Image (spheres, grey):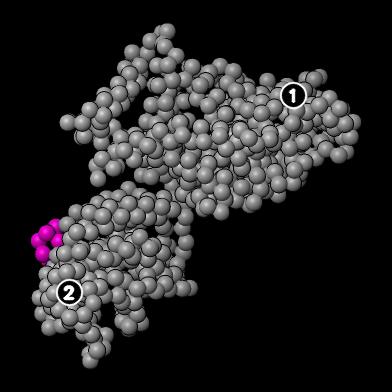
Amino acid sequence: MLITITIGCMLLILYHHIGYPLLLKYLTQSQTPKERPLSASDANTMIDDDSALPSIALVIPAFNEQQYIADKIRNLAILDYPPNRLKVIIACDGCTDNTAAIARQTSQERSCRELDIEIIEYRRNSGKVAVINRVLPRLSAKIIAMSDVSALISIDALKHANRAFADKAVGLVTGHYLLANPGSDGEQSYWQYQSKLKQREAKLSSIIGAHGAFYLIRRQLLLPLPENTINDDFVIAMAVIEQGYRAIYVSSINAVELEQASNTLDLQRRKRIAAGNLQQLIRFRSLLSPKYRGVAFSFASGKALRVFMPLILIGAWLGCLLLAKGNLFFALTAVLQSCLYGSAIAYSLVKPRAPNKHLQTIYYIVAGYAANLVGCIEYICGGKCFGQGNITGRAYTIDPRIKFFKRLIDVIVATALLIVCSPLMLLIAIIIRVNSLGPVFFSQQRIGLSTPRYVKFFSMFKFRTMIDHAEASSGAILATANDTRVTPFGAFLRKTRLDELPQLVNVLRGEMSLIGPRPERPEFYQRLDDEIPFYAERTFLIQPGITGLAQINQGYDTCLEDVRVKLGYDHSYALSLFSPLQWLRMDCYIMIKTLVVMVSGRGI
């Protein structure tokens, strides 16, 4: 298993960095370009027929941008687009410097007077997303453009975008991102690589996210953003795709970034981007469906793998270290990886004045993945919740990050346990068949995830621990101490909880989770709900589990009081889902305690 996991990690690393770009190149090299150069006759026709051009509103959120705002306005004033069809909105987001004053002063310069510009000042800094949502109701233009203050736009960018929007299937247009003053050769190489990927993704189907320096979108497709959105440019682009339109890359549109970020600011920015990538993967996971074809392929191979790449890199390195003894291939691979990471660490410590270009690139990539890992961890443990509902007057918050990672862990662990425990399960099946009459497996209808409006039912699988047709004469009744219906081997299975191993199949089918409240039988559900307050709410928005806080602290239910006690544990577990950090602590505690219960035989 260790060899399989290690080789799997190595193959994913090679695929993400080499295989995916080459495959994209192969898939797109035979396709005709989506865009053609703008001829002089086309340009003249566009300029002469101003009335045919769509109105454009260019929104520029600004926070303490006095260094760049004047150059930005002068850049907009010379854009090749009719002034009466272009409106510029500069939204000062609680600026504490002279951004607004300089903007007004620059707008009165002779070369800028024809520019239709509106300067909005908000007293408090609320963030770029809040600014976009506030400005959105003011916008009536057919096309909305977004741009950063520190990015200069090529003079004919709006004309090229207008030509791209002639295709009714295009919902968003972005262009080439350039750095006027790259912080290092590694940063320059990285953005050149990203630009090539975007160009090929656009040829295949649609780009996966736009760059905030400059992009344009049809007004009807620009929806209000969730308040805690991290990467607004990516979310807006993916929302366009989700609505059935294409987001395309036009190489003739250029946005030149003037600001040169320090190493500290660059790492902070990359941490934010990483957290945003994770948020986007959770929010737009439906785009991974095969029905989206090229989009799903690019999203999974690019953004999704990038989120998990730090863990994959660590897995490959640790796996090679553990397998290095006695295996030349893994030993050499471990040395190579250690040298790469060691050189990046040495570079960050020494900081040479005249660094080697290749060493810079290695450092930039490794530092980027380190920032990626930290950003994702901070998002999981410290980010704000962004999904909540009020159920029957009681506030329940199920953070989508928890739902996503809980399901991911369920699938990974359940798959691994089924593989590892398959010999044991086969042995248990043989013993059951030899020692008692009847089927090996036992299925029973249970109640799963529910809300006030609906209840899900599913068939829960177990190893049979009772005699065949145990309820034929008695009907559905609660288990009792020293239950005569339980077989001798069945009693052992119950004490060790091994009878619940087949429920791993229910986990893979999405009917159960590894950890959650015990799934109840429909025959008892109504009676328990009538006699115990808030009983039904125990599984509201929560998948039932194989093990859980109630199961490790209380045995099988033998009376109404047992159920009442368990209910307190179930609601305590629900409270841990308010916070990712609390959830991680709680699930780790439950898993450890479950192993103790199984080994000690205290399952009853």
Q: Where is residue 94 in the image (x, y as percent from the top left)?
A: 58, 34
Q: Where is residue 247 in the image (x, y as percent from the top left)?
A: 64, 41
Q: Position of residue 465 (x, y in %)?
A: 18, 75
Label 1, label 2: how many angstroms apart (C-alpha)? Answer: 80 Å
Residue where numbered disc 1 is placed: 155
Q: Residue at x 21, y 57 (%)?
A: 421
Give the quadrant of residue 63: top right
Q: Which residue is drawn at 30% across and 75% down?
A: 443
- Judged left or right of residue 81, residue 239 is left
Q: Which residue is drawn at 37% across and 70% down?
A: 448
Foreground: 565 or 194?
194
Element at label 2: helix
Residue 232 shown in magenta: no
Q: Earlier in the sequence, mark 1 or mark 2?
A: 1
Q: Residue at x 43, y 73 (%)?
A: 455
Give the magenta range: 596-604
From the image, which quarter does the N terminus lie in?
top left
Foreground: 390 or 594?
594
Residue where numbered disc 2 is placed: 433
The amino acid type, in three-letter code, at marker 2 is Arg
Taking the image as drawn, is residue 20 in sight? yes
The amino acid type, in three-letter code, at marker 1 is Ile
Q: Position of residue 185 (x, y in %)?
A: 49, 17
